[in-house]
Image (cartoon, rainbow, N blue to C red):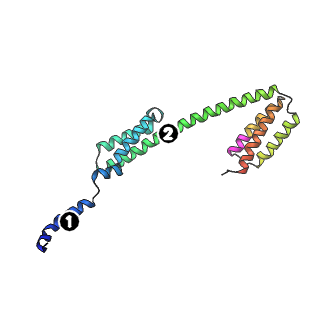
Amino acid sequence: MTLARLSRLLPALVFLAGCASKTPPAAEKAAVPPPLESARAAVREAQAARAEEQAPEAYRAALEYLRQAETGSGAGAREAAIRAEASARLAAAQVELKQVRERLALTQQALEQAETELIRSKARLKGTETKAEASSAIAEARILLRRLRARSAAATLCQESLVKAEQHLARDNYGAAVFFALKAQDIANRALAGPTR
């Protein structure tokens, strides 16, 4: 092949090489969705989670930012899309948090019902535990309570159980008094032992 022919082909080869090194637009889009697409997806997820009812403020903000992103252009539209996605994700997270709190409340209610049933059972079996055992369990719980950091969550829970223990002791329901005193001890011991891994 002559030098003259190579020099004529050189521009075409450079053009082809440039095309080959570029990522095809479709593949580029698939790899990283543009902010507007991510925002739309996040808003759809928030809508599916019923954020309009359960997290209306964040959801409305997401819709407003999305509107700005869809009608705007340039950097302003991009920023609005990013804010729309963040607001939609916040709305979905608020819905999830609300659901977790509702489940926790139901669990707490079930626990309290079980506790009430246990106290009733202990009251029917009055005499199994003695006043001395109840007083001793309460005294041990008080010692442990003093070792806890004041105003900590564990100290509050321990104190609540101790108050219940003393109330049942005053009613001569020694079984329930022991139950709440041991519960207070357990709370205190777990707090003093620290987090387990």
Q: Is residue 14 above or below residue 196?
A: below
| Residue occupying the far front of the picture | 1
Q: Where is residue 82 shown, x and y percent of the image?
A: 38, 48
Residue labelled with disc 1: 14
For residue 109, which quarter of the picture?
top right
Q: Is residue 193 above or below residue 48?
A: below
Mark 1 lies on a secondary structure that is helix
Please tell me which residue is depicted at 74% across the width and 40% down the height of the picture: 159
For residue 60, which quarter of the picture?
top left
Q: Amino acid at mark 1?
A: Val
Label total for image: 2
Left or right, 87 with respect to 7, comes to: right
Query: Which of the two residues, 11 or 57, is positioned nearer the viewer here?
Result: 11
Q: Where is residue 185 shown, x and y percent of the image?
A: 77, 43
Please tell me which residue is depicted at 70% across the width and 51% down the height of the picture: 194
**Residue range highlighted in magenta:** 152-158
Residue labelled with disc 2: 94
Please tell me which residue is depicted at 80% across the width and 34% down the height of the picture: 177
Label 2: few (<14), some (14–19) or many (≥20) C-alpha neighbours in 10 Å: some
| Residue occupying the far left of the picture | 4
Q: Where is residue 87 shown, x and y percent of the image?
A: 43, 43
Residue 58 seen in render = yes
Between marks 1 and 2 in the image, the one whose residue lies nearer the viewer: 1
Q: Is residue 26 magenta?
A: no
Please tell me which residue is depicted at 54% across the width and 35% down the height of the picture: 99
Label 1: few (<14), some (14–19) or many (≥20) C-alpha neighbours in 10 Å: few
Query: Which of the two residues, 142 or 18, is positioned nearer the viewer here?
Result: 18
Earlier residue among tags 1 and 2: 1
